[in-house]
């Protein structure tokens, strides 16, 4: 069983792509609705919350947990992988994030290659990154993209309040206003030059991809994280089949830390009409 974690409902965009891609695998999703949003929280809180949810998924039988959240990945993934996991009781388990596959797609360079190679070495494109305050402050996208493509210009833009507005079903006009504010903020940093590629660096944002599409020019390629992450997980599982060995397959369970799973289920169906109901996480 593969665990997928997000601070709230945004990770459902990733989960849905994974369920489509791996119909023979079982998934356990945990949304930390009691603490959403993570995007404005201090880093140490994001780390503690992400570790707690990862442990909850491990203790329910997941050997592999995917952080389906950019904020959690940007702030906590490296710490969990390098500092916490090796000393915890969960040796033999693993945590993956969603920044690495996104950087691979944005740079056309495998994650393991961390030095510029031809032709990426000479790539002078502009890449835009939209994210939460905490993801943007972490600087993880520019850092990892520039390692591989040093001449690429990476421009970052916080879309303040957008994840929360999506999570709480703000009206379309309000969502569009926040997207326009983000796009204009990004363009103000490039003298109006639109990016060649745009990373929607928050798993909530695919739900308003049509609004980004409307306000970015047609030549800007929007990188869709759910697809990119599904591609990457397919490759990972082909090399690490033991994480899902013995999986009877095909089950999907959704857990929430919120005391009102029925409300969460109702909101989730707005994003994914056929999604199974949420139940309260015991951990
Ligand atoms: N969905 C999360 C992300 O990808 C963040 C939303 C939040 O702020 O909790 O960044």
Image (tube, rainbow, N blue to C red):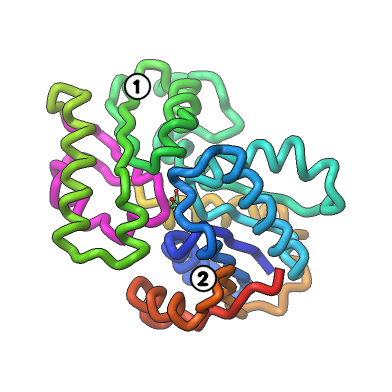
Quarter the C terminus occupies: bottom right
* Residue 183, percent from left and from top: 20, 40
Asked where in the image residue 4 lies, by quadrant, the reply is: bottom right
The picture places residue 270, in percent across and down from the top left corner, at 33, 75
On the image, numbered disc 2 is attached to which residue? 19
Above or below — where is 186 with respect to 29? above
Above or below: residue 144 compared with residue 260 = above
Label 1, residues with CA under 10 Å away: few <14, some 14-19, many ≥20: many
| Residue in the picture at 32% in, 22% down | 153
Measure the alpha-carbon separation of dots 1 and 2. 34 Å
Is 122 located above or below residue 101 in the figure?
above
Does the magenta run of residues contain 208? yes
Q: Nearer the viewer, residue 166 or 82?
A: 166
| Of 98 and 42, the residue lying toward us | 42
Kindly identify which numbered label has been placed on residue 241.
none
Membership of 56 in magenta stretch: no
Q: In this image, 241 relative to 156: left or right?
A: right
How far across and how far down the image is residue 12, in percent? 46, 65
Q: Which residues are magenta?
A: 194-222
Task: Give the percent coordinates (x, y) of residue 99.
Answer: 50, 41
Element carrying mark 2: helix
- Helix, strand or loop status at disc 1: loop
| Callouts 1 and 2 close, C-beta under 8 Å | no
Q: Is mark 1 within 8 Å of ligand 1?
A: no
Q: Residue at x 52, y 55 (%)?
A: 68
Q: Earlier in the sequence, mark 1 or mark 2?
A: 2
The structure residue drawn at horizontal position 18% and vertical position 57%, both measured from the top left corner, is 174
User: Crowdedness of circle 2 by 10 Å Cα count: few (<14), some, many (20+)?
Assistant: some
Say which residue label 1 marks: 152
């Amino acid at each position: 069983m593969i665990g997928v974690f997000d601070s709230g409902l945004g990770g459902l965009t990733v989960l849905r792509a994974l369920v489509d891609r791996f119909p023979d695998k079982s998934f356990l999703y945990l949304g930390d609705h009691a603490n959403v949003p993570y995007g404005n929280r201090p880093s140490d809180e994001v780390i503690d919350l992400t570790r707690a949810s990862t442990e909850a998924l491990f203790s329910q039988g997941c050997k592999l947990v995917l952080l389906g959240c950019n904020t959690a990945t940007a702030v906590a993934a490296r710490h969990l992988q390098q500092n916490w996991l090796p000393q915890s009781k969960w040796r033999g388990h693993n945590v993956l994030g969603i920044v690495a596959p996104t950087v691979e797609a944005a740079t056309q360079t495998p994650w393991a290659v961390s030095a510029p190679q031809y032709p990426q070495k000479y790539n002078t494109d502009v890449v835009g990154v939209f994210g939460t305050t905490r993801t943007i402050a972490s600087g993880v996208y520019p850092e990892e993209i520039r390692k591989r493509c040093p001449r690429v210009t990476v421009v970052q833009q916080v879309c303040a309040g957008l994840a929360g507005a999506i999570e709480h079903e703000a009206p379309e006009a309000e969502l569009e206003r926040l997207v326009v504010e983000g796009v204009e903020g990004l363009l103000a940093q490039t003298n109006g030059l639109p990016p060649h590629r745009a990373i929607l660096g928050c798993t909530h944002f695919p739900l308003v991809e049509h609004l980004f599409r409307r306000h970015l020019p047609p030549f800007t390629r929007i990188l869709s994280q759910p697809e990119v992450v599904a591609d990457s997980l397919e490759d990972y599982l082909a090399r690490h089949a033991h994480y899902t060995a013995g999986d009877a397959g095909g089950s999907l369970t959704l857990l929430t830390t919120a005391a009102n799973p029925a409300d969460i289920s109702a909101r989730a169906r707005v994003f994914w009409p056929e999604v199974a109901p949420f139940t309260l996480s015991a951990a």
